[in-house]
Every structure is written in structure tokens, then in C-alpha cells.
Amino acid sequence: MTRVAAGSSPPWASARVNEVILQVRVQPRARRQGIVGIIGDRLKLAVTAAPAAGRANAAVLAMIACLAEVPPSAVTVVRGASSRDKTVRIAAADPARILGRLRDAGACART
């Protein structure tokens, strides 16, 4: 796939034609939901949902959709559905805009 705006991508995200790929680490059963910080090359997200029956994955996808301001149907887990480390795809007509929103959100929470 062809990359878009590779120089401005954080290590946990990459923009490609019509999509953004995120590398995330999920902390299920957290007290609060939100971006916890950056762990290596992954964006760490905390969700209050338990990892049973796909509830934590659904919470992660909803959070990412909200942060990126895209419909929930545009966000999918492409790798790691049963793992804390996940690869998430956001379908987007303007990947650079989505990447900018996520970069700003991720910059607010660094560890």
C-alpha cells in the first residue's frame, strides 16, 4: 500500500491511501476510559469494559471512532482481537486529517 504523509506520522500510526493504521495497547477493566499514554511504538488506551465477549474491543473501537470523528463502522481490528496489543484500521477519505486528530489526542497523554 502507498503511504501518505509518512514524515508527520507518530510511531504508533501510519497513514495510507484511504486508511490509517494504529498500533494500540489496551488496558481492559480500567477505572477510567481514555488515552493513557505512549508505550514504545503503541498508543495505550484504557477501557472500563471487561475483555469478555468482545466488550473491550467494542469499547476500543468506539473510543477510536470518537477521537477520529469517524463513524464506528469505519474502525476495525485487523490483528490482535484476543490480545492486548492490537492493530486497528480506520477507513478514511482524508487520512492526513484523521492522523492529525489522533496525533493531537495522543500528544496530550505521554508516559
Image (cartoon, rainbow, N blue to C red):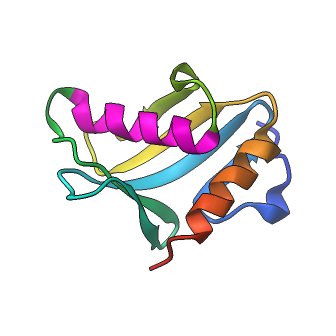
Vertical placement of 60 versus 46: above or below? above
Q: Would residue 111 appear left or right of 50 to someone viewing this image? A: right
Q: Would residue 101 appear left or right of 71 to someone viewing this image? A: right
> For the stretch drawn in magenta, what is the main secondary structure?
helix
**Viewer-closest of 24 and 79:** 24
Q: Can you say which quadrant of the picture contains the N terminus?
A: top right
- Give residue 48's position: percent from left, percent from top: 23, 48
Residue lying at 29% horizontally and 49% vertically, measured from the top left: 47
- Give residue 66's position: percent from left, percent from top: 53, 38
Residue lying at 34% horizontally and 31% vertically, measured from the top left: 58
Q: Can you say which quadrant of the picture contains the C terminus?
A: bottom left
Q: Would residue 13 appear left or right of 84 to someone viewing this image? A: right
Q: Would residue 102 appear left or right of 38 to someone viewing this image? A: right
- Give residue 17's position: percent from left, percent from top: 80, 34
- Give residue 64's position: percent from left, percent from top: 51, 41
Residue range in magenta is 54-68
Residue lying at 26% horizontally and 39% vertically, measured from the top left: 56
Q: Does the magenta stretch include residue 33?
A: no
How many marks the image carries: the answer is 0
- Can residue 50 be spotted in the picture? yes
Q: Residue furthest bottom?
A: 111
Residue lying at 67% horizontally and 62% vertically, measured from the top left: 104
